[in-house]
Amino acid sequence: MSAPTLTKARTGRSVGEQAIRGLLALAALVSVLTTTGIVVTLLEEAVSFFREVPFGDFFFGTKWTPLAGGESQSFGVLPLIFSTLYLTFIGLLVAIPVGLGVGIYLAEYASPRVRRVFKPVVELLAGIPTIVFGFFALTFFTPLLGDLGFELRIFNGLSAGIILGILVVPTIASVSEDALSSVPQSLREGAFGLGAAKWQVVVRVVFPAALSGVVAGLVLGASRAIGETVLILVAAGNSPNLSANLGIEHQNMAAFIANTARADISAGSVAYGTIFAVGATLFVITFVLNLFAIRFVRRYRQVYE
Amino acid sequence: MSAIAAEKKLARRTVERGSNGERTKDLLFRSALLLCLLVAVAFLGALAVTTLSDGVGRLSGEFLTGEPSRLRTDSFGIRPALIGTLYLMVLVAAFIVPVGVASAIYLEEYADGTKWWNRAIETNIQNLASVPSVVYGILGLAFIVRGPVDIFGLGVGQPTLLAGALTLGLLVLPVVIIVSREAIRAVPPSIREGSLALGATQWQTIWKQTLPGALPGIATGVILALSRAIGETAPLILVGAVANLRFNPEIDGPFSALPALILSAVGEPKPEFQSIAAAAIIVLLVILLLMNSVAILLRNRYETKW
């Protein structure tokens, strides 16, 4: 990209150079094929699923018992979508303040030495496999909440939701820290020059200036929370619920997919089809959120870089 | 650095000169932020303490070398899953290093960013980086395990180690590409221009100048991607990893891996399995910590300041 004219002259000359360029482009195509593969797979199986189950029954039905036999089998996905969004909401209630707090602290307040210690801590939190969080929620946090007086079943939405929030903290913290750090120093100096206190500078000048990047972090965090599988599978149980009660089981879409795949059902059955129908729904939701996030990130990069 | 320090000092003095009310608010705001950091650290600490206190007692040579058993829990071992995880690491690396680095080179050094297809590839990679892992699992299940893609004629229609590795590889490929691109971009244009001016072709310039300069960054990215790959559970469930495999996995046969074993142990009602799960988690975390230390070492030791 550095010297386009030179580049063109060079590659034009040799067959070997052209072949290398072709091979590299082929490698870049792998990621395009991955997306195509995902879309084709989901679409193909989801279409044959919707041949068996009417569209309206799926998206507007309120009873989700796809693995039951005979009369009691029902494919209303609403409880599953509700539980997914509800768990994400609980998670974000924790993750937004904590994640933003960590991000703002590291970007605006921490001395270089403090940052050197705590940035790796946040990265460490991001690197822990989610199965470990599931274990932690089930064996430590749920009993702890029980001791604190909450009415909980062993598998419940409260513990899973809160830990889901902790899991998303590093995403929100690091994206918002990046966004805040890329706000030009002159803005802060101007505000200080006008006599503003530090917190006013941060809250009224730096934060609004970094808003699109911060929003991108929040959207990415939400998308991560919506797609989380194992934590929910381990700690929140195996039935979605159209209920605001957090003490009972809540299953999200990703956990349903994993749990159904574990049940070892035969390929081609309607139950097998639910994996793809739910997977397609999940993919569309996260895809839209990710596009939003990418757009927001581009915006703040354009303004300040 | 000193400019920032001076600025900070200046900022602090400004605050101290502010009115009494502003000073209190400032202290409150600062404490609230610090509290957020403490919450995150506290959870990390509690997680470490729980896992260690539950699991350390189970760790032994026998635990690492034995086979899993539901009945004889006192001689429970994780060897097949541990070997499966190490195999996965090698296979995933063999896939993502060439494909990921080649993609990054193409996008940074060859692709014309004004063309819509190159921009589409870029957006696509960013998007893939945040597709839920369970969706990759579905891809693995339908396309690789039960589907039309026959890789080297090995075990199609079966949940094999290779299918698992390929699925995990696709999952972390975007990470490798994004980090490698940043590393390549950090090599200053003057290095390339110097090489081209001396008559090297573009590929010679990339191979002899740009890539060596970007290598530490690329290696860090690959290690981070690998550590994400071996910690993933959801795709393994979909692809059909066996939780309690009793023999060593092979490339074209049934396989197991630590996250699958942990998931199954967490779900067992017998209380002994809680300590087994915790001990297996410790082993997994130790592997991840080792990998991350290597990444940090590489970064500190070989990072070039231009």
Image: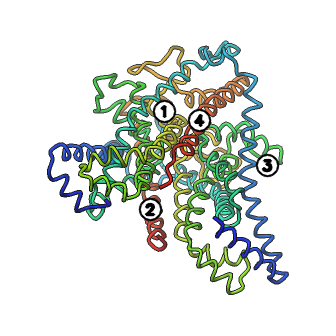
Image x and y of residue A167, in percent: 62, 49
Question: Answer yes or no: do the residues labelled 4 and 1 have beta carbons within 8 Å?
Answer: no
* Depth order, front residue of B168/A279: B168
Amino acid type assigned to the residue bearing label 1 in the image: Leu
Q: Measuring 28% from the left and 33% from the top, which residue is drawn there?
A: B148
Amino acid type assigned to the residue bearing label 2 in the image: Ile
Q: Nearer the viewer, mark 4 or mark 1?
A: 4
Same chain shared by disc 4 and disc 3: no
Classify the position of the N terminus of chain A by image quarter. Answer: bottom left
Question: Answer yes or no: do the residues labelled 3 and 2 have beta carbons within 8 Å?
Answer: no
Amino acid type assigned to the residue bearing label 3 in the image: Phe
- Mark 2, residue position: A294
Asked if residue B83 lies left or right of residue B174, the reply is right
Q: Nearer the viewer, mark 2 or mark 1?
A: 2
Q: Which mark is residue A150?
A: 3
Same chain shared by disc 4 and disc 1: yes
Amino acid type assigned to the residue bearing label 4 in the image: Leu
- Mark 4, residue position: B288
- Mark 1, residue position: B236
Helix, strand or loop under label 2: helix
| Dot 2 alpha-carbon crowd within 10 angstroms: few under 14, some 14 to 19, many 20 or more | some
Helix, strand or loop under label 4: helix
Mark 4 vs mark 1, CA separation in Å: 18 Å
Mark 2 vs mark 1, CA separation in Å: 28 Å
Q: Chain of mark 1?
A: B
Same chain shared by disc 2 and disc 1: no
Instruction: Choose the circle earlier in sequence order: 3 or 2.
Output: 3
Q: Chain of mark 4?
A: B
